[in-house]
């Protein structure tokens, strides 16, 4: 099966989809990092007294940041799914 000729508009849509993919990847990494620090590292270091107890006060901020990055990742994922529809214009058959 040969693909159709890719137009400049389709290349632009492919480019935008790739940008959304990298944004999704960054948001997922940022979400995971915030959750890891807020849920595992800070409580562990506070319980062993390697960090002062007042550091635990920043945990809600990190959880809020994690929630924001999760929502941003979901938004980017929706845009990725919408963006890959251009592939069906290039390769019309869905099953090979």
Image (tube, rainbow, N blue to C red):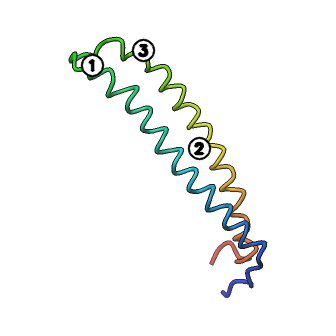
Circle 2 residue? 73
Q: Label 1, secondary structure: give it.
A: loop
**Callout 3: helix, strand or loop?**
helix
Compare marks 1 and 2 and give the one earlier in the sequence: 1
Dot 1 or dot 3: first in sequence order is: 1
Horizontal side, residue 50 vs residue 60: left or right: left
Relative to residue 67, is residue 84 depicted above or below? Answer: below
User: In the image, residue 29 lies at what x, y percent?
Assistant: 46, 45
Residue in the picture at 76% in, 73% down: 89
Element class at badge 2: helix
Quadrant that contains the N terminus = bottom right
Q: Residue at x 58, y 51 (%)?
A: 23
Give the residue at mark 3. 57
In-front residue for pair 27/5: 27
Q: Earlier in the sequence, mark 3 or mark 2?
A: 3
How many C-alpha atoms fall within 10 Å of the one at disc 1: few (<14), some, or many (≥20)? Answer: some
For discs 3 and 2, the disc positioned in front in the rendered view: 3
Measured as percent of width and height from the top left, residue 67 is found at 56, 31
Q: Position of residue 8 (x, y in %)?
A: 76, 76
Outermost residue on the bottom side: it is 2
Q: Which residue is mark 1?
A: 51
With respect to residue 95, does 23 lie above or below?
Answer: above
Dividing the picture into quadrants, the one containing residue 16 is bottom right
Mark 1–mark 3 distance (CA, rounded to whole Å):
12 Å
* Cα gap from disc 1 to disc 2, whole angstroms: 31 Å
Residue 32, position in %: x, y? 44, 39
Mark 2 surroundings within 10 Å by alpha-carbon count, few (fewer than 14), some (14 through 19), many (20 or more):
many
Residue found 75% across the figure and 72% down from its top: 10
Q: Vertically, is 43 above or below 30?
A: above
Q: Quadrant of residue 35?
A: top left
Q: Is residue 91 above or below residue 62?
A: below
């Amino acid at each position: 099966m040969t693909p159709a000729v890719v137009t400049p508009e389709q290349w632009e849509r492919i480019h935008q989809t790739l940008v959304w993919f990298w944004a999704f990847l960054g948001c997922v990494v940022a979400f995971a990092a915030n959750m890891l620090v807020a849920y595992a590292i800070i409580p562990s270091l506070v319980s062993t007294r390697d960090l002062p107890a007042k550091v635990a006060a920043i945990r809600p901020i990190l959880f809020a940041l994690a929630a924001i990055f999760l929502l941003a990742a979901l938004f980017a994922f929706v845009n990725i799914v919408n963006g890959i529809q251009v592939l069906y214009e290039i390769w019309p058959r869905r099953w090979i």
